[in-house]
Image: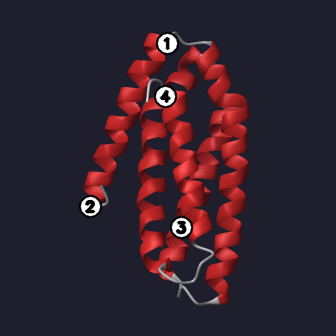
């Protein structure tokens, strides 16, 4: 992983795979725990390491960053609701559908706007350093959750 854009997109793909796996009723409890860890670590790493730089002017996109923070908060609420729901319930399926919609919209917005703007306004060295900070923070959060 050479730059933060690649690191974030790799995380997005991992999260999408977990969402798809949740459509299979077998193993949902374990998959939800994995998704919770992946989302929590990803969100924390973005909000701690990446968004402050975007907000502070590497790539001024305040409205987009605010929308991303809101999507993260909504996804956090929904994934916690999944953890509290019976994997065989209709509620679980409805919450999963809402979560998929929130994540899909967020990923599209981030990959079509925020990340290209960040890449265009940063040197490869900056993107590499940011990837290291993002990956380290992500790993630290996963370790704190016992989900590494």
The numbered mark, 2 or 1, whose residue comes first in the sequence reads 1
Mark number displayed over residue 112: none
Looking at the rendered image, the disc whose residue lies closer to the viewer, 2 or 1, is 1
Looking at the rendered image, the disc whose residue lies closer to the viewer, 3 or 1, is 1
The numbered mark, 4 or 2, whose residue comes first in the sequence reads 4
Mark number displayed over residue 146: 2
Examine the rendered structure and indicate whether residue 33 appears above or below residue 122: below
SS category of the residue bearing label 4: helix
How far is disc 4 from disc 2 in space, using C-alphas? Answer: 24 Å
Is there a contact, CB below 8 Å, between mark 3 and mark 1? no
Few, some or many residues within 10 Å of mark 2 (<14, 14–19, 20+): few
The residue shown at (63%, 42%) is 68
Few, some or many residues within 10 Å of mark 1 (<14, 14–19, 20+): some
Mark number displayed over residue 124: 1
Mark number displayed over residue 79: 3
Query: Do we see residue 30 in this rendering?
Result: yes
Examine the rendered structure and indicate whether residue 59 appears above or below residue 13: above
How far is disc 3 from disc 2 in space, using C-alphas? Answer: 17 Å
Mark number displayed over residue 4: 4
| Front-most of residues 127 and 98 | 127
Looking at the rendered image, the disc whose residue lies closer to the viewer, 3 or 2, is 2
Few, some or many residues within 10 Å of mark 4 (<14, 14–19, 20+): many
| Front-most of residues 36 and 26 | 26
Examine the rendered structure and indicate whether residue 75 appears above or below residue 67: below
Residue 36: image location, x then y, percent: 45, 63
Few, some or many residues within 10 Å of mark 3 (<14, 14–19, 20+): many
């Amino acid at each position: 992983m050479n730059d933060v854009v690649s690191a974030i997109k790799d995380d997005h793909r991992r999260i999408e795979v977990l969402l798809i796996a949740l459509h299979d009723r077998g193993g949902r409890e374990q998959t939800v725990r994995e998704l919770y860890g992946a989302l929590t670590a990803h969100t924390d790493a973005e909000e701690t390491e990446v968004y402050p730089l975007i907000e502070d002017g590497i790539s001024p996109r305040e409205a987009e960053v605010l929308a991303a923070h809101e999507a993260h908060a909504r996804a956090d609420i929904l994934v916690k609701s999944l953890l509290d729901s019976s994997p065989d319930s209709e509620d679980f399926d409805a919450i999963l559908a809402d979560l998929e919609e929130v994540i899909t919209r967020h990923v599209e917005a981030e990959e079509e706007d925020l990340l290209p703007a960040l890449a265009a306004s940063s040197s490869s060295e900056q993107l590499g350093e940011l990837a290291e900070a993002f990956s380290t923070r992500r790993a630290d959060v996963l370790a704190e959750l016992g989900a590494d």
